[in-house]
Amino acid sequence: MRKLQPMTFAALISLLIFNTPSFADTFTHRQTNEVLHGYATTQCQNNQSTVHTQEKGELKLNLADWRISPDSLGRNNKVTVITIDGPIMLELTTAALEQTLPKAADEGPLFILLEIDTPGGRIDLAQRISAAISSITNCQIVGFVKGGEHGGAISAGVALALACDKLYMAKKASIGGAMPITVSEQGAKDLKKSYGDDVGEKFSSILRANLASMAEQHGRPGLLAKAMVDRDIEVIEVSDQGKRLFIEPVNKMTGQTLEHTWSKKGSLLTLTAEEAVKCTIADKIADSREELLRDMGAQNAEIIANDCFQQTEKEYKKLRLRLSKLRQSLDLKIKQLQLESNPSKALGLLQEIKTDFKSLLLLAKKYPDSNLNVQAMENELNSVEAAYQDLIRQTRKHN
């Protein structure tokens, strides 16, 4: 597994989407009672959303004028499956998912199935992906924490799972352990040890609030989501006149009956699939994609596999290989230049070095994951260009 780099927090504060999801299939006009069947898309201009209907084809509708009932009428009998099966570490993958989700939603599937098996990764990237999931209000996104090599939705992967409208888990999968950390050559440290109590608490509080908000939007206990981030949060379940409440022990009132202790101080909350369903963090257990599809009434749907996560991982490997070859080429040519006494051959080498630096600069600008410093590349290119021009002048003087 790729070594995790220190986490960044520039994008940690993301706008939360509080819109109530409306997986539009049946539209009833509020005044005329006209009924249409179809699905809305994310395309919207001047309050007019593009809607594909069975009765009238593509229309521009102001959705505020219509009562929208979620069902499968008018949708295409297909399910788009996106699998996230590894660390969340690449800008490349994050951008691909941000583009893929609305495109998939606009094709009108019964729902988008997001299969998750990740040990976590960069918090800022996980937050971007979870924000992209939350922003899809025209198509239901069903999460499936399938377990596997990485065990489920761990660490930053919790954000992805909680952002889904409905959440299934395989029996052997887990969810939790989302305390933000930094990872360096010295090992893993929590934020407070890396940045100090004040800064560490600031970032932790943002993440706690973010996960709790996502959980609560889908009817899940926000306090349990917080306990996955902060080992100091204790959570108990009490019954109060027939209602289930998840509270901190200090808030327990007379008359409330203690039912279960979910999180004790000193340990991050991590839940098995059975526990997650019991405490309503997850909706149901499903041991396979097929079982999940049957439960969702989509066993006969066409499966559209979207491999954007896997393709960007392959693209990243190709990028690393290309960077390695360019660096080797540059090293060799620079050594040759240092030994070259023929001005004409030196000019040729400098021209080739310029070409290699231009290639590196293009990659640095296109791929943030390259970890190349654009300004440093530009400075190097300018230095090579200056040496090239200086050698041309010297050659002309001698001629």
Image (cartoon, rainbow, N blue to C red):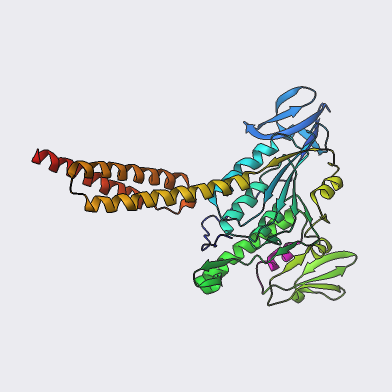
Image-based side of 10 in relation to 342, left or right: right
Residue, x 41% and y 43% (percent of image)?
A: 362
Q: Is residue 72 above or below residue 245?
A: above
- Is residue 267 highlighted in magenta? no
Residue at the far left in the pictured view = 398
Where residue 311 sits, quadrant-wise, is top right
Image-based side of 29 in relation to 312, left or right: right
Residue, x 86% and y 46% (percent of image)?
A: 294
Q: Position of residue 297 (x, y in %)?
A: 86, 42
Q: Nearer the viewer, residue 90 or 33?
A: 90
Q: Nearer the viewer, residue 118 or 275?
A: 118
Residue at the far right in the pictured view = 242
* Quarter of the rendering occupied by the C terminus: top left
Q: Nearer the viewer, residue 51 or 289?
A: 289
Q: Position of residue 16 (x, y in %)?
A: 64, 51
- Is residue 228 highlighted in magenta? yes
* Quarter of the rendering occupied by the N terminus: bottom right
**Residue 368 visible in this rendered orientation of the protein:** no
| Number of marks in the rendered image | 0
Q: Is residue 365 above or below residue 245?
A: above
**Residue 58 visible in this rendered orientation of the protein:** yes
What range is drawn magenta here?
Answer: 221-231
Q: Is residue 149 above or below residue 237?
A: above
Where residue 78 sits, quadrant-wise, is top right
Q: Is residue 338 above or below residue 243?
A: above
